[in-house]
Amino acid sequence: MNFHLLLLFLWLLASLAAWLWMRADEEEQSLVNNTSLSDRIRFALIGLRAISQHVTDASEQRILGQYAQRSRIGSLIIVLPITIYGAVIAFTPTEEEPFVEAIEILEDKKQTPEPEAAKPKVRTYVRGPSGKSQLNPEAEPETLEERRTPTRLYATAKVKPLYANEDLLGIQILRVDDASFWEIVGFKTDDFILEVNGELMNTPAASVSFMNAMNTSPELIIRVRGSNDEERVLVFNQSDHEDE
């Protein structure tokens, strides 16, 4: 008899646990359903934008979208745990700040904190009247190395490969931003790149080699044709810019 009562008690307990689990799942699903897709996207974008202000390396920026979790603990909380310099960054919207209240960085205690000067500098860019991106006057100037990162190379100029049927004729420069690495090398708007370090720009692989050279090569010898159809040679040597 006692054995049957025990079985009945366990069955009732299991049924109660299952019912509570289903209720919790229904409440969570209701929260998701009552939040529009546009609001969810807006929350995520605002959080990612705030995080990106603390990240300058392109590879780390790609980590930003790897994981996002939304739950309700008292109020709506958006948590984006991301490994950046051994830190976890959390965003908590409140009534005063509807989307992002604060950025809390929890340093990994096992690591020695970096000196303040060694941490990456936050740089903000503004769009000028001509459509070119330019460094905010209040921000510190970029170093030459920072100007040559792939992210900044693609952001500070507009280039377009030109094809005839399936053959690559060369690469055209449609825009060059002020104070960019492109301008330092000597590129001008409407320049047509013909040859880079002895390699003709007549294949897709050559165009990839060109961007790699712009990123890392200590020396660049580039033959271009300007808008007036005159050819000129651009020469860049890293050693001439060591102090920049």
Image (cartoon, rainbow, N blue to C red):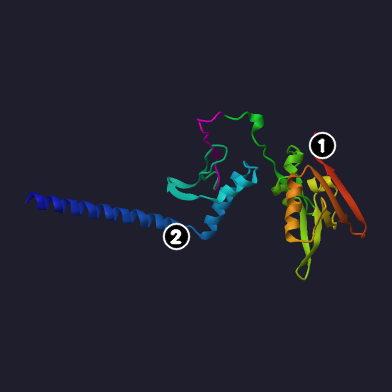
- Quadrant, the C terminus: top right
Residue that numbered label 1 is attached to: 239
Residue 232 % position (x, y):
91, 53
Q: Is residue 167 left or right of 223 when viewed as pictured?
A: left
Residue at left offset 52%, top offset 40%:
88
- Nearer-N-terminus badge (2/1): 2
Q: What residue type is labelled 2?
A: Asn
Circle number at residue 168: none
Q: Which amino acid does label 1 sit on?
A: Ser
Q: Residues within 10 Å of mark 2 (few under 14, many from 20)?
A: few
Residue 208 % position (x, y):
72, 55
Q: What element carries label 1?
A: helix
Q: Is residue 199 left or right of 104 when viewed as pictured?
A: right
Residue 221 % position (x, y):
84, 48
Residue at left offset 14%, top offset 52%:
7
> Measured along the vertical axis of the image, is residue 82 above or below residue 117?
below
Question: Could you say which is closer to the camera, residue 150 or residue 115?
Answer: 150
Residue 198 % position (x, y):
83, 52
Q: Is residue 222 left or right of 97 when viewed as pictured?
A: right
Q: How far apart are marks 2 and 1 (CA)?
A: 59 Å
Circle number at residue 33: 2
> Measured along the vertical axis of the image, is residue 242 above or below residue 199?
above
Residue at left offset 74%, top offset 53%:
209
Question: Could you say which is closer to the camera, residue 4 or residue 44?
Answer: 4
Q: How crowded is mark 1: few (under 14 residues within 10 Å), some or many (20 or more)?
A: few
- For the magenta stretch, what is the residue range? 99-112
In reply to whether residue 103 is colored magenta, the answer given is yes
Question: Could you say which is closer to the camera, residue 143 or residue 194?
Answer: 194
